[in-house]
Amino acid sequence: DIQMTQSPASLSASLGETVTIECLASEDIYSNLAWYQQKPGKSPQLLIYDASSLQDGVPSRFSGSESGTQYSLEINSLQSEDAATYFCQQHHDYPWTFGGGTKLELK
Amino acid sequence: QVTLKESGPGILQPSQTLSLTCTFSGFSLSTYGMGVGWIRQPSGKGLEWLANIWWDDDKYYNPSLKNRLTISKDTSNNQAFLKITNVDTADTATYYCARIGQLDYWGQGVMVTVSS
């Protein structure tokens, strides 16, 4: 199975700041990576697909990038509504696997 | 507008079979490239992909569940199904279905508790 190692597990940031969440794949997943946002009691929502493509309706302060097997989600100009847990997920090979999640808290 | 909604028994006992239904609208499982996936999430924990079914009836399962899974579809009624046999307390979770290609639309989830 492809392991997705996500970091950090949690972070705290202030309104207006920029944060970066990372996922390291255990092997090449050829950009077949998505990022999701999940708020308490809600289902995950797709933010980014194919590593860097912004899903329709998602604010442009969210962006994705990659470097080798390292994938990053950057959130610029943090807003209060960005407080959530974020997950990465690879769909290059079965079984599809998720990162462990990053809980983002706003100070 | 794409929507999905999961339904299930709520509570069941160990060793029973869990049957879940995903009823969807806004897309068809007879359309090339469409599919439905099932994902679960124990309370306070991460996401685990379970199974996918595609428009051409291709099926894929998470091998960690050791042949306990069966996914199927009813294209005419816009439904997908997941069965998990021989459940135990470790199967207690919220179960989601989602549209694939990407997991771009998700249902609200259904909570399932396995308890004696």
Image (tube, coloured by chain):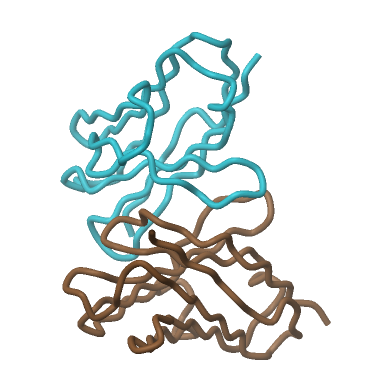
Q: Is residue B51 left or right of residue B96?
A: left
Indicate the position of residue B39 as horizontal and vertical percent values.
48, 64
Question: Residue B4: where, in percent of width, then height?
Answer: 47, 67
Which residue appears farthest toward the right when viewing the image? Answer: B116
Q: Which chain is brown?
A: B
Identity of the residue drawn at 36% across and 64% down = B99
Q: Which quarter of the rendering shows the C terminus of chain B?
A: bottom right
Say how many tags the image has: 0
Of B99 and A31, the residue lying toward us: B99
B1 shown above or below A29: below
- Residue B3: % across, % down: 45, 63
Q: Is residue B96 above or below residue B66?
A: above
Q: Is residue B43 left or right of residue B57?
A: right
Which residue appears farthest toward the front when viewing the image? B1
Give the colour of chain A: cyan
Q: Left or right: B106 with respect to B115?
A: left
Query: Horizontal and vertical percent for residue B14?
Result: 73, 85
Please identify the quarter of the rendering in which residue A53 is found.
top left
Taking depth in this image into account, of B58 and B2 the one nearest to the observer is: B2
At a point 52% along the width and 85% down the height, the residue shown is: B83
- Taking A105 as reference, is B60 left or right? left
- Residue at the image point whose x is 22% and y is 43% from the top: A50
Q: Quadrant location of the N terminus of chain B? A: bottom left
Residue at 56% across, 72% down: B6
